[in-house]
Amino acid sequence: MTFQPLVSDFYSYESLLSEPEQQAIMALRGYLESEVRPIIGGYWERAEFPTQIVQPLADLGAFSFAWDETRPFENSAVFRGFVAFEMARVDASVATFAGVQNGLCCGSISVCGSAEQRAEWLPRLASGELIGSFGLTEPQSGSDSAQGLATTARRDGDNWVLNGAKRWIGNATFADVTVIWAKDVADNHVKGFIVPTSTPGFSARKIEGKIALRPVQNADITLEDVVVPESLRLANANSFKDTAKVLRLTRAEVAWAAVGVAAGAYEAAVAYSKERVQFGKPIGSHQLVQDLLSKSLGNITASLGMVVRVSEMQDAGQQRDEHSALAKAFTTSRMRESVAWCRELFGGNGIVLDYEVARFFADAEALYSYEGTREMNALIVGRSITGQAAFV
């Protein structure tokens, strides 16, 4: 299989990948293009998730790149970033599903779990046998999760009793297991728990009426005296600082996905500019259209450079919270700008699902907000710059 560069990768960043990594990317791209792109618009409109793609994605390794229990990472963080990028340039909801499964759920167990917990749960999640989700955000607690978490965990002998509510929990309506973050009433510190969704007292209700990421099955979760054994408490999650270790990795992945969304909108706009004829010639021959495309490509190229470097720092063990935060804040802002320019190029056609740019345009709003708003990430970066916290 010959590696084919993307029109959106103007500086050929994917050429930094090893040959085996390039072949793996091509295999993933081939599946996404042939099996996901043709159907995803309908699922987006119906607000349903195409569950039939889960096992093929698992077979392609999409849920196991980052959390290998038996040997060092076979693939670079740059490669894992391009996996998120490739999924997002076809559909942001697919990338979000994988991000929750692999980054947030598997990531929590990998970073904060014991060796026994990792051995028990990670292979089953990586293989697609189990679907996972991640419960941190609450109805009244989003950006202030470090302090404002209201869900409680109370030790009762060899068990823990969880009570509270979570909101915006991706995959939760059909997940087999959810990582729930709750505040220990004894020491007021945040702890993590692996909660099978079949546990009595656990319920998930789908959030309706979304205008972005419609295939993602976000839910309101209610926890009413949910009993979890001590063996399912994440052994190395003892405060919100441990939760933040997971978010540092997943925030960088969202930055990659944001670049993918911008690339998907840009690729659709390039194709449309060659097909759409106005005033007797393709609109791509008009100066103002070329300006929109050039500005969008500049944003994508700059963003790719940033996320590639952040992933290189991750491989080198140099990545810090502020590095991921700056990447997430910058790439989502540039994504939002670029998809608006690309939608503008389509005119009225840019607001109907017949043209993919409408989906990218709507979905960009969700990526702009989740995994830390631009403002919160700016404050993380600002704290690093000045040495002063300005969160309150």
Image: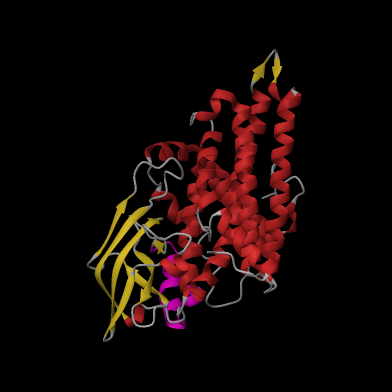
Which residue appears at 63% of the width and 28% of the height? 345
Please indicate whether residue 134 sits to the left or right of residue 347 in the image: left
Seen from the viewer's position, the closer of residues 388 and 325 is: 388
Q: Residue at x 54, y 23 (%)?
A: 348
Check if residue 129 falls in the magenta segment: yes
- Magenta segment boundaries in residue numbering: 110-130
- Nearest to the observer: residue 57 or residue 328: 328
Q: Main secondary structure of the magenta part?
A: helix
Residue 297 in the image: x percent, y percent?
71, 41
What residue appears at the point 71 percent right and 27 percent down from the top-left corner?
289
From the viewer's perspective, is residue 164 above or below residue 332?
below
Q: Is residue 342 above or below residue 26?
A: above
Residue 328: % across, % down: 61, 56
Q: Is residue 156 left or right of residue 323?
A: left
What colour-coding does the image apply?
secondary structure
In this rendering, does residue 105 appear at all? no
Disc tally is 0
Residue 375 falls left or right of residue 280? left
Q: Is residue 279 visible?
A: yes
Outermost residue, top direction? 280
Where is residue 2? Give x, y as percent.
70, 49
Q: Quadrant of residue 116?
A: bottom left
Q: Position of residue 75 (x, y in %)?
A: 64, 66
Q: Is residue 231 found inside the magenta-colored segment of the image?
A: no
Residue at 44% x, 59% y: name it.
142
